[in-house]
Amino acid sequence: MKYTSPAHASIVALRQLNAKRIALLSPYELALHRLLPPFLRENGFEISADGTFATSSGTENNKLHRDSIFTAAKELVRHNSPDALFMSCTAMPIVPHIETLEREIGIPVISSTQAMAWDALRLIGYTRPINGFGRLLASPRL
C-alpha cells in the first residue's frame, strides 16, 4: 500500500530538490512552530532561518494574505542563503503563488500541500511535469 502525508511528502520533496539548508515559514502558534525545526533537523536538514505568523486556528491560516506571506518569505531568505524555502501548513493559501514567489526570491519554494500533491503523483507513477506551481511540480517525479 502506498501513502503520503504532509510531513512525509515535504521531506521527500525537499530531498528531490537537493535542499540541505532551508528557511522555514509556518502560520502556527509558537508552541507548535517550535516542533518543526527539530523534526527537520532529525531528517537531515539545516535550518538557516525560521519564522511564524503565530496564528491560533486553521481559519486564520487560510486567511493569510499573499503579500504578508511574500514579505515574510523574502525577509527569511534575505541574508540566510537557504537552498529552499519550506512553508509548513496545508491551510496556508500559497500554492497558486509559488511560482511567482520562486521567481522573486530565486530559490525553490515547497509547501506542504504542493509537496503532498507531488508525492501522490509520484506514488501512482505520474511523471510528467506540471507547470505553473513551482519547480517541484515542474520537475520529474523519481
Image (spheres, rainbow, N blue to C red):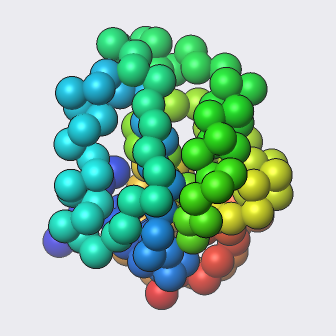
* Picture quarter with the N terminus: bottom left
**Residue 40 rendering spot, x and y as whole percentages:** 28, 60
Residue at figure coordinates x 21%, y 55% from the top left: 38
Q: In the image as oriented, which residue stretches furthest toward the bottom? A: 142
Direction from residue 25 to residue 40 in the image, left or right:
left
Residue 63 to residue 115: above or below: above
Q: Nearer the viewer, residue 69 or 8?
A: 69
Residue at figure coordinates x 76%, y 63% from the top left: 106
**Residue 42 rendering spot, x and y as whole percentages:** 19, 67
Q: Nearer the viewer, residue 140 or 126?
A: 140
Q: Quadrant of residue 128?
A: bottom right
Q: From where the camera sits, is residue 114 visible?
A: yes
Direction from residue 74 to residue 59 in the image, left or right:
left
**Residue 104 rendering spot, x and y as whole percentages:** 82, 52
Direction from residue 113 to residue 64 in the image, left or right:
right
Residue 3 to residue 17: above or below: above
Q: From where the camera sits, is residue 91 visible?
A: no
Residue 60 to residue 22: above or below: above
Residue 105 to residue 74: above or below: below
Residue at figure coordinates x 74%, y 48% from the top left: 101
Residue at figure coordinates x 44%, y 45% from the top left: 50
